[in-house]
Amino acid sequence: MLDDTVRVAPVRAADLPEVGAFLHDHLNPRLSAADWAAAAVPTWQVDAPNHGFLLRAGDRLVGVQLAFYAEREVEGRTVRFCNLGAWCVLEPYRGHGLRLLRAALAQRGHVFTDLSPSGSVVAINERLRFRSLDTTTALVPNLPRLPGRRRARVVTDLDEIDRALDGAERALFRDHRRAGAAHHVLLDAGPRGRCYVMYRSDRRRGMRLFATLLHVSDPDVLRRCRPDLARHLLARRLPVTLAELRVVGGRPAGSVLLRHPRPKQVRGTEVSPDAVDNLYSELVLVAW
């Protein structure tokens, strides 16, 4: 029988310092308590009901489930998303952990995503009617560019990127400009077009060597100018790019497909899995 003195409550702004310290101590110490607390607050405008849910045993914090909310236009409709983030419960209270997830899912009117489920979470989500996204992922080595073969100017100055973009791409950039895990690059190929790329640096087996592409505005420009992006990433000690085929529009030349790409899941019938991307989520906010 579950201990009825353990209660679930929404994470409010006043709870964030304590939540940040909890996640630093018990989930990922590479992020400071202050970094965790800051990452829990989206950089885009949204009327969020909470920052997730927490478990308390008496006055003691024993579990956290972060959540990130966004309102987005999908096929001409406004859809409310809730992205499920870090989920951590102390061992003696693991029996209460599912209460956090159920509290989040009880919020009606949202499409729920989990873009970084790990271990047994995937199976738990499946039992709760989550569907899997196609995350077929190519591994691409970032090779040095040959002299005299530059195809695009690589722009990293954020103000210049802001001036160059317009419409929906500028809105995406402005919403994510201050996001802690997002890096921004504009490939300017002059009359041949330009491509806005958002990526994060990721660890695999403890090594932060991977640039994971989160958003690509023009896959055709990226395909032509990938050597310039590769050189840029290599200079930042990221020798490998991870590219989901749904993000880059096809398998890059010279790539190898991962045998076990990381799963991503969605719950809700309001949108198709193909309409779910990596933005407005933990992936852009939390630099693990």
Image (cartoon, grey):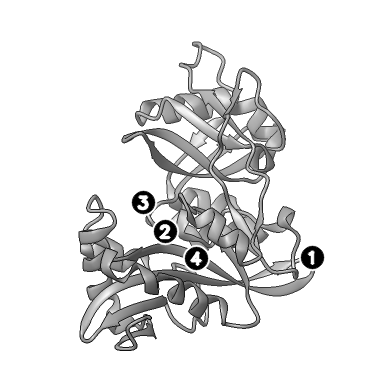
What secondary structure is found at the residue carrying circle 2?
A: helix
Identify whether 227 is placed above or below 206.
above
**Within the image, what quadrant is residue 58 found in?**
bottom left
Which residue is under mark 3? Answer: 287
Which amino acid type is marked by label 4? Answer: Leu
Total numbered labels placed on residues in the image: 4
Name the mark on residue 75.
1
Which amino acid type is marked by label 1? Answer: Glu
Inter-mark Cα distance, 4 to 3:
16 Å
* Residue 241 picture location, percent across and down: 50, 31
Crowd class of label 2 (few under 14; some 14 to 19; many from 20; radius 10 Å):
many
Name the mark on residue 49.
none
Identify whether 135 is placed above or below 16.
above
**Within the image, what quadrant is residue 43 found in?**
bottom left
Which residue is under mark 2? Answer: 285
91 or 282, which is in the foreground?
A: 91
Which amino acid type is marked by label 3? Answer: Ala
Q: Report if the CB atoms under discs 3 and 1 are less than 8 Å apart.
A: no
What secondary structure is found at the residue carrying circle 3?
A: loop
What secondary structure is found at the residue carrying circle 1?
A: loop
Q: Earlier in the sequence, mark 4 or mark 3?
A: 4
Inter-mark Cα distance, 1 to 4:
23 Å
65 or 158, which is in the foreground?
A: 65
Q: 46 left or right of 51?
A: right
Name the mark on residue 84.
4
Which of the two discs, 4 and 3, sits closer to the camera? 4
Q: 272 left or right of 278?
A: right
* Residue 264 picture location, percent across and down: 58, 51
Taking the spot 59% from the left edge, 58% from the top edge, the residue there is 170
